[in-house]
Amino acid sequence: MITVVGSVNLDIVATGPALPRPGETVGGARLARHPGGKGANQALAARRLGAEVKLVGAVGADDMADEALKLLQSGGVDLSQVAHVNGETTGVALIAVDATSGENLIVVCPGANNVLRPGDVADLPIEHMMGVLEVPVPVLLAAAEKATGFVSLNLAPAMTIPDQLMTLADLLSVNETEAETYGDRLMTCGALVAVSLGAEGAVLYKDGKEIARAAPPKVQVVDTVGAGDTFTAALTVALIEGKSPQDALAFAVTAGALACTRPGAQPSLPHRRDVDALALGGK
């Protein structure tokens, strides 16, 4: 069982001909609403890839909560530890997507995600754990300390975090920008460090040395929202399953590539059979 400690959002997505520059208005966009949040995305991604998953999170006591949780519920994620908080809104992400390149800009309104506390995991048995920085750091620390198995932390969005959190992790996942923010701390904390490189794939490090590198298969990119979450979840699931670092990384970049072929964060998350089929097709 993987316990995911993380955010639940409703994504409101505008897909248009170009991303706006500061002060610019871009018209002609299409509007869509999808369940999202990095914690929820990674929980559903891990579930679709074959893991048993429980989500620890919070939503508001509002009309958006059911919509934000809909795919998690139908996908078989255990939501018994998701709180519905009076007086708070469900988290919302406002996303602009370039229809040509699939690149995006995101503004997050965290709402109920900010009310999670260490007490929410105090009595919870945790084997394997995944966490993201869209919830308060103290609750991630508390969960990582309780975990008896593999601990995977996606250090996004980049922020100041204590060394203790890094040293509790078996795997730290970041993109290139986040890797620059954390600098040498990533390579000296003892964890495996995965750095995603977008269309170029990803690299896996141990103690500052590269131990694996993988390029994704060629796909038609529609929307990159959710690709990073898919990559992190897939890499975590593969390593827990005992795959070698190279095989786990190849599996993860393949899953991440598939997530780019459909719009929306959670609707685009691939199933295990599709990842395995694409991986075999590329050999």
Image (cartoon, rainbow, N blue to C red):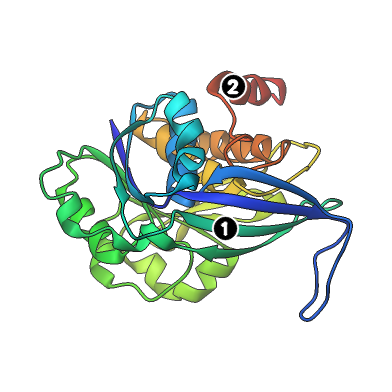
Q: Position of residue 262 (x, y in %)?
A: 72, 36
Q: Position of residue 64 (x, y in %)?
A: 50, 46
Residue located 87% across and 62% down the image: 27
Relative to 263, 183 lies left or right = left
Which residue is under mark 2? 276
- Closer mark to the observer between disc 2 and disc 1: 1
Which residue is under mark 1? 93
Residue toward you, 50 or 6: 6
Residue located 46% across and 74% down the image: 183
**Could one spot residue 129 in this view of the protein?**
yes
Q: Quadrant of the N terminus?
A: top left
User: Which quadrant of the figure has residue 273?
Assistant: top right
Q: Position of residue 49 (x, y in %)?
A: 48, 27
Q: Label 2 is placed on what type of residue?
A: Asp
Q: How many marks?
A: 2
Q: Label 1 is placed on what type of residue?
A: Ala
Residue toward you, 11 or 125: 11
Crowd rating for badge 2 (residues with CA inside 10 Å; few <14, some 14–19, many 20+): some
